[in-house]
Amino acid sequence: MVKVLTTVIVSAGALAVAAWIFDGIRITGEDDTERVVTLLVVAAIFGAINAFIAPVVKLLSLPFIILTLGLALIVINACMLLLATWIAEQVDLGFVVDGFWTAVGGAIIVSLVTAALNLVLGAD
């Protein structure tokens, strides 16, 4: 349970950094508390997508990933971020990613920040 909570908090922090860097990624809400709750829920959604859907997509895309020397993983991560955005919109959360290229940049930032935070926190 602690590991899941740590993962959600780290992902929320990474999504917040991506929203801070890119104008096309927005977290909306009435106040800071609502925006933090939105970030935590979107991070949980993103984590569930990365736990269940992303491995299947990566397995099915393996030849293309090998052919592109792993660069296709950036596109897959961007698509997972767009899927999380779509789900967030369906449940009326204030999280928006404007377009594919913003999602690519956001996916890169989320990956880098998540790796850095996991390194600092000593998480696996």
Image: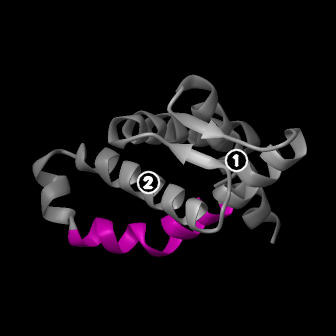
Count of marks, rendered view: 2
Q: For residue 82, which numbered disc appears in the image?
A: 2
Q: Secondary structure at mark 2?
A: helix
- The rendered magenta stretch, by its main secondary structure, is classed as helix
Label 2–label 1 contact, CB within 8 A: no
> In the rendering, at what x and y percent does residue 6 appear?
77, 56
Left/right placement of residue 15 relative to residue 80 reads right
Q: Report the front residue among 75 and 69.
A: 75
Q: Which residue is mark 1?
A: 12
- Three-letter amino acid code at the position of disc 1: Ala
Q: For residue 56, which numbered disc appears in the image?
A: none
Where 103 sits versus 3, above or below?
above
- Residue 83, located in which quarter of the rendered image? bottom left
**Circle 2 crowding by C-alpha within 10 Å: few under 14, some 14–19, many from 20:** many
Left/right placement of residue 69 relative to residue 8 reads left
In the rendered structure, does residue 59 fall within the stretch colored magenta?
A: yes
- Magenta residues? 44-60
What residue do we see at 18% from left, 45% from top? 69
- Three-letter amino acid code at the position of disc 2: Leu
Q: Secondary structure at mark 1?
A: helix
What residue do we see at 42% from left, 33% from top? 105
> In the rendering, at what x and y percent does residue 37 appear?
81, 53
In the rendered structure, does residue 74 fall within the stretch colored magenta?
A: no
What residue do we see at 39% from left, 48% from top? 78
> In the rendering, at what x and y percent does residue 96 appear?
55, 46
**Circle 1 crowding by C-alpha within 10 Å: few under 14, some 14–19, many from 20:** many
Compute the Cα span from label 2 to label 1.
15 Å
